[in-house]
Amino acid sequence: MSTSLLKLRVNGHAHTVAAPDNALLLDVLREQLDLSGTKQGCDGGECGACTVLVDGAPRLACITLAASVQERAIETIEGLTQGGRMGRLQQAFHENLGTQCGFCTPGMVMASEALLRREPHPDEAQIREALAGNLCRCTGYVKIIESVKAAAGYTP
Amino acid sequence: MTHDRSLRRPPAPATHSIGQRTPLVDGIEKVTGRAKYTADLPLGRTLVGLIGRSMVAHGLIRSINTARARAIPGVLAVITSEDFSAPYGVIPIAQNEWPLARDKVRYRGEPLFAVAAVDEATARAALAAVAVDIDALAPLFTSADARAEGAPLLHENKPGNLERTVEQDFGDVQAGFDAADLVLKRSYECAEVAHGQMELNATVAQWEPERERLTVHSVTQVPYYLHLMLAQTLGLDSAQIRVVKPFVGGGFGHRVEPLNFEMVTAALARAAGGTVKLELSREEVFLTHRGRPSTVSRIRIGLKRSGEITALDAEVVQRGGAYAGYGLVTILYAGALLHALYRVGAVRYRGYRVYTNLPPCGAMRGHGAVNVRFAVESLLDEMAQQLGIDPFALRRANLIEAPYRTLNDLQVNSYGLPQCLDAVEQASGWHTRRGKLGPGRGLGMACSHYVSGSAKPVHWSGEPHAVVNLRLDFDGAITILTGASDIGQGSNTLLTQVVAEVLLLPMARIRVIATDSALTPKDNGSYSSRVSFMVGNAALRAAQALREHLVEAAATQLKVSADRIEWAGESCGVAGSDQRLDFAQCVQAALAVDGPLTVKGSWSTPLETQGGKFRGAAVGSSAGFSYAAQVVEVEVDEDTGTVRVQQVWVAHDCGRALNPMAVEGQVQGAVWMGMGQALQEETRYHEGLPVCCNLIDYRIPTIAESPPIHVTLVESMDPLGPFGAKEGSEGGLHGFPPALINAIADALGLRMDTLPVTPDRVFDALQVRRRERRLLAQRAARQEVTTP
């Protein structure tokens, strides 16, 4: 397996990393760029915990080759906090207990972020559809739905 | 803390924290991705650990040859059971498991050897280079096979492959059945289920060869038990060991006992003389297992026409897997919690915990009581129908009045079940909607309960059940030092609220340092819903002790007696005067006496709540029982057998909601986990090989099929709980499976007796009924023809 220099644009910053050609985006983010907010919860494409955005669309970093997303806009959970302010979804998940153990939360927030950019005022069915690939074992999803609605500006 | 008066703002008024819908104190770390779980820890370069596992379900280990693996450059350690000093197990009287199998393997996937190498590729090469020679024995995969006469024994000292047989009789059972107007007997089956916590298992172990010291970071719910078992299995003095629990991504019981990979990582670190990180795959997490066992429950109930329960007879068989784990506790819980939900005339219980050649079962949310509660509540529903009694009325005919002592010596001090029944009956529109929802739709209800902490700890040492330390220093910040494991349930938040409330201070002044054996007092761990009740009580007492110190210091400073000080958190003063001190002055006065303060609060369960004198009486005993009732609304597609849960209404008596938002979240999570078990979750094995060991085939419900869960919190104000609180995380689970089954019966007139009610099972049951109806119709038609 040969090693290449990859040009990755992550949370607005350009990085050049040396990685084997079969390196997964998840491993490059976590191990080489110290972005451990993106989680691994399964053996590949089962749980959604590693969801990041690539050009604004949700992607599973655990089954994405790092080399395949060069020069594209990659966003992780760390990128949603700007200038010491949490993003709207981060704030809403925090205030509405959309997170318990927190392990699925980064993926859940990123999948929700993609939804709200596409559809600023989703109804419940759209929220369920957008998050159907993200498993949570703590909440029963009830407060996750409430959190996404709160971030979208719905008042309970 | 500044002492410049010109900068000081007027002190904030007294702040109340109990009963507030407070976000998690560590929620910001979780939503920003800054929370460090074990696999995220920045501990520098580590060696990669991997485990080699048995391909054979049952066999004698002839040899494990590691020579070729050791010779590979970059391999620093290859270990087998020879690297351990003793077996382990969470229950002191049932320790029959080695971190790596010794002499015999008892399930497919059991750890046999382990390697540590400079990188993953080298570690994989080393795994492949180990040669294992095993003489296969006949495997036993079912409880029936394992109990059959002449079956080979998994453990030589356990005849009949029975880990534990429980025989308990309370009251005159025969007289109870004789006095009944209706006696019904049914058998129910529940498939084995797994915890499915989202975080994969991981451990990082650091061995300092020069000092012979070990530091372990792990995903545990029980760092103290892990500490004990590391010392025992590695032959170390416990003073050589430090155990730290970082953020943990859920547990649900998977991590309430020390697990093989944790001890294996530590042994690898010692053998390699460095730092080893071992991360399990999802498949390996399923192999580690410790889930809820496959269970057959044979239940017989006697009822008066009024609905009064005259007698209850239960025989429970649990397929326990290959090792003891928590097994004997699980089989005892199943019997103990037949009591304390309702008044029951007499109870007979027979429990059998069976060893089989499958991954070991253990404790899972609702430990021991879920499957038998499913059976009892399902049968009560069927009997209510036969007697023509409403299911709510049947429950109301059997209510307890607290304080109440059960037949098996459990002490019920508070009992909010009547209010729970009222709440869900009304919220669900039970009487106006039931039977009027249209074809294929129905409502079902059930009740449940659970302990708020096991009244006797696993390791009975005579120490208090919980201890919390509070530190106060020059900065005026209060630090809670606790060994309690926050695994996502919010214990750090709860303890902060309790301390803040006693001191009437804002929560922002309080920090938590938790679960580091070098810093925090020992805690038994996060299991049996003990933390709110026991550690909450310890935190309450620690905060009271600190407040007393501060009040004394203020009184000395202001030259009055302590009873004249009015405490208002950020300030205090002398009653009836304008003499006041703000918090900073108060802290300064307190520290002036003898420097920085550390106070302690401890709590133990009162003796009368610790259960009776019979064998096994400790299991089920608790200082407080939670209660819950729920109504489930379903829609069943009769063409496909698909069951959809439309809505759930649940009421949970948590004593007092210390944080209503957090308790709602716990109750919703518990009910929903019950739904997963009832509807679709099931581990399956082919010749001992797990075939659902990923999150696609093991079907945890997604957001798409998860219903709204409406929660009512009932506050019965327990006399022993902190501020009246009891557990809120487990008791809602047990009621879901029977409420669902009862709703299906309401929808279809069909009583399912096997979980999960997957579409194929429902479809098959419908087919059987169609066939029976067709036969009946044919027979009736023939009779018409032959009858003149």
Image (cartoon, coloured by chain):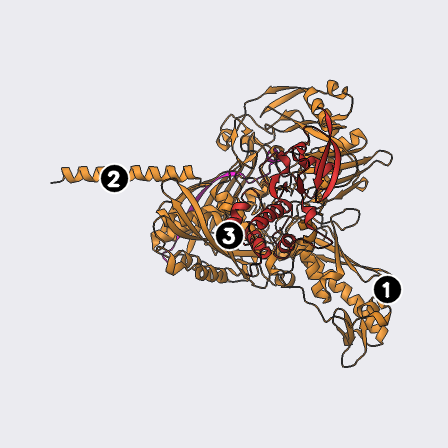
Chain colours: A red, B orange
Residue B602 image position (x, y, % from top left): 72, 57
Are discs 1 and 2 both within one chain? yes
Residue B421 image position (x, y, % from top left): 47, 60
| Whole-number angstrom distance, CA of label 2 to CA of label 3 | 46 Å
Q: Report the quarter where the N terminus of chain B lies.
A: bottom right
For mark 2, give the secondary structure.
Answer: helix
| Whole-number angstrom distance, CA of label 1 to CA of label 2 | 87 Å
Residue B430 image position (x, y, % from top left): 41, 58
* Magenta-span inclusion, residue B464: no
Q: Inspect the image, locate mark 1, and give the three-letter code of the amino acid beneath it.
A: Leu
Q: Disc 1 sits on a residue from what chain? A: B
Q: Disc 3 sits on a residue from what chain? A: A
What span is in magenta? B285-306
To which residue does mark 2 refer? B776
To which residue does mark 3 refer? A124
Query: Is B613 in front, or is B502?
Result: B502
Residue A137 image position (x, y, % from top left): 58, 45
Note whether A16 is above or below B610 in the view shown: above
One can see residue B47 in this view? yes
Q: Nearer the viewer, mark 2 or mark 3?
A: 3
Mark sitting on residue B591: 1
Note whether A18 is above or below B751 in the view shown: above
Are discs 2 and 3 both within one chain? no
For mark 1, give the secondary structure.
Answer: helix
